[in-house]
Structures are given as C-alpha cells and as structure tokens.
C-alpha cells in the first residue's frame, strides 16, 4: 500500500520491497547501509578503492543522518544553509558529489521548518552529472515528515519513485497520527536496490521469513494500528 502511495514501479503481481522499522531512524540506517553496500560492490567489481564512502545532505538533516555517518563510517558532506534559504540547495549538493558518493539524501519536510526540498530539480541536475561522469549516484528521500502528507495534499508534486534516481524512501508512520509512536517504513524502488546479502532468511515459524532490521524483536501494535487507519480511512 505504501509502495503504491509512493508510485513504486510495480507489476500487477509483484511484491513491494520494504520493511517496517522503529521510526525513521532505523529506516535511514537501513537505507544508508543498502547504498553503502551497493556502492562498495560496484567499486570492488571495477577494481577501485572502496574504503572512503561519503553521503551528501543538507545541514538541516535530522541527527539520525549524523548517527548513520558516524556509526557506519561514512563521510557526511553537508550543504551549508544560507540566510533566507533553509534547505539543501540542489545545485550545491550536486557540486559536492564525487565518485565516492553513495547517495544524495533529500528531505521532504525539513525538521527546521517543514519545507520540502526540490527533489525533482535534484534528480535533473544529478542525472546530468551522472551522464557527464559515467557515475550512477542515486537519491534517497527522507520523507519522515512529508511522506504521508504530499501524496494526499500535493499529488502532482514529483518527489517519489516517479523520479528515476530515487531508489529508496523512508517515512515515519507515527507522524501521520492516529497510531502509536515508534513506527517507520523504508521502501525500495525494486529488488535490485536492496543488496540480497543484507537480507537474512529465517524459519522460526516454519516458513521462510526474510528480515532486514537492526532490531529483531519488536511489538506489532504499531503496524496493526497503522494498517487499520489506512484501510479504515482509505485514500480519500
């Protein structure tokens, strides 16, 4: 349901690729790990160094991005804010991108002022740079605050999987309201964007259960409450 809400390119019978998390913080850690591993695998295959990954964000990111960078040893390249412009400037962000950039993270709903960053312009500028350099630097959208707002209030706004370089999106279920705190989601564009070696297959309950989480044991009340609200209220 959430993948369709974000316009993931899914076939009729194709399962969405995503995971329920403990808020957007865990979702961002998992998305970042997927980008890091995919970048490392590509660099290894090309026989190039893979020990200095970096990620480009605005200086307005939530602290969990700084945590990801520090915990998983990724250099954080921050686009400085300026007077009157309090979100990441797409042009300055793309200037910071180099061959070691695992992704550019855009925010849909800045923690500072709720403003949406221009993901469409970022996609255009980054596509151009990728074509010039031969890189394939992707985009992650941190839609913690805006992911359950934009599809309903601004359906014409292109920020999600309609943009080709957007490979993953996180959203905070609890910022939508009417649920318990502590529910987040991470959705990937397709299976190729989540390296298979990060997924563990277990059979605790007698059938294959793929899992990609930092924390295995957690309650289901948040998921059930969110699911109830989505089917009870519907899209309208």
Image (tube, rainbow, N blue to C red):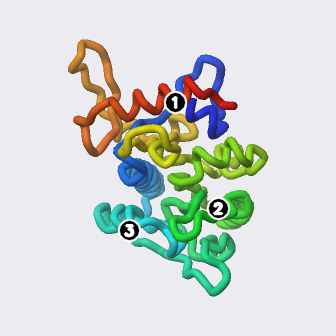
Residue 7: image location, x then y, percent: 66, 37
Q: Does any portion of residue 172 appear in the rendered image?
A: yes
Residue 147: image location, x then y, percent: 58, 47
Q: Is residue 215 above or below residue 37?
A: above
**Quadrant showing the N terminus:** top right
Residues at marks 2 and 3, CA–CA distance in whole angstroms = 20 Å
Q: Please tell me which of labels 2 and 3 falls first in the chain.
A: 3
Q: Nearer the viewer, residue 53 or 17?
A: 17
Q: Which residue appears farthest toward the front when viewing the image? A: 178
The residue under the point 32% across, 41% down is: 213
Q: Residues within 10 Å of mark 1 (few under 14, many from 20)?
A: some
Depth check, mark 3 against mark 1: the one in front is 1
**Quadrant showing the C terminus:** top right
Depth check, mark 2 against mark 3: the one in front is 2
Q: Is residue 235 left or right of residue 103?
A: right
Q: Nearer the viewer, residue 3 or 172?
A: 172
Residues at marks 3 and 1, CA–CA distance in whole angstroms = 32 Å
**Residue at the spot of label 2:** 116
Secondary structure category for the residue under label 3: helix
Q: Residues within 10 Å of mark 3 (few under 14, many from 20)?
A: some
Residue 34: image location, x then y, percent: 42, 48
Q: Which residue appears farthest toward the right when viewing the image? A: 156
Number of callouts in the render?
A: 3
Secondary structure category for the residue under label 1: helix
**Residue at the spot of label 1:** 229
Contact (Cβ within 8 Å) of mark 2 with mark 1: no
Depth check, mark 2 against mark 1: the one in front is 1
Q: Which residue appears farthest toward the top when viewing the image? A: 206
Residues at marks 2 and 1, CA–CA distance in whole angstroms = 25 Å
Q: Is residue 28 above or below residue 81?
A: above
**Residue at the spot of label 3:** 66
């Amino acid at each position: 349901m959430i993948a369709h809400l974000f316009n993931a390119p899914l076939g009729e019978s194709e399962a969405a690729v995503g995971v329920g998390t403990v808020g957007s913080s865990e979702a961002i850690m998992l998305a970042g790990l997927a980008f890091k591993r995919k970048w490392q695998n590509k660099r290894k295959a090309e026989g190039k160094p893979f020990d200095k990954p970096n990620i480009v964000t605005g200086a307005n990111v939530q602290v969990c991005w700084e945590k990801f960078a520090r915990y998983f040893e990724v250099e954080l390249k921050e686009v400085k804010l300026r007077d009157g412009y309090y979100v990441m400037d797409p042009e300055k962000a793309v200037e910071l991108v180099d061959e070691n950039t695992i992704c550019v993270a855009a925010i849909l709903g800045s923690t500072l002022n709720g403003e949406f960053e221009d993901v469409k312009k970022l996609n255009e500028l980054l596509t151009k740079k990728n074509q010039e350099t031969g890189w394939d630097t992707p985009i992650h959208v941190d839609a913690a605050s805006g992911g359950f707002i934009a599809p309903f209030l601004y359906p014409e706004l292109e920020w999600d999987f309609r943009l080709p370089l957007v490979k993953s999106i996180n959203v905070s279920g609890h910022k939508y309201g009417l649920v318990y705190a502590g529910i987040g989601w991470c959705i990937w564009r397709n299976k190729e964007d989540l390296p298979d070696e990060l997924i563990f297959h277990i059979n605790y309950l007698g059938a294959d259960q793929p899992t990609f989480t930092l924390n295995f044991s957690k309650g289901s009340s948040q998921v059930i409450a969110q699911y109830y609200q989505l089917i009870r209220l519907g899209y309208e």
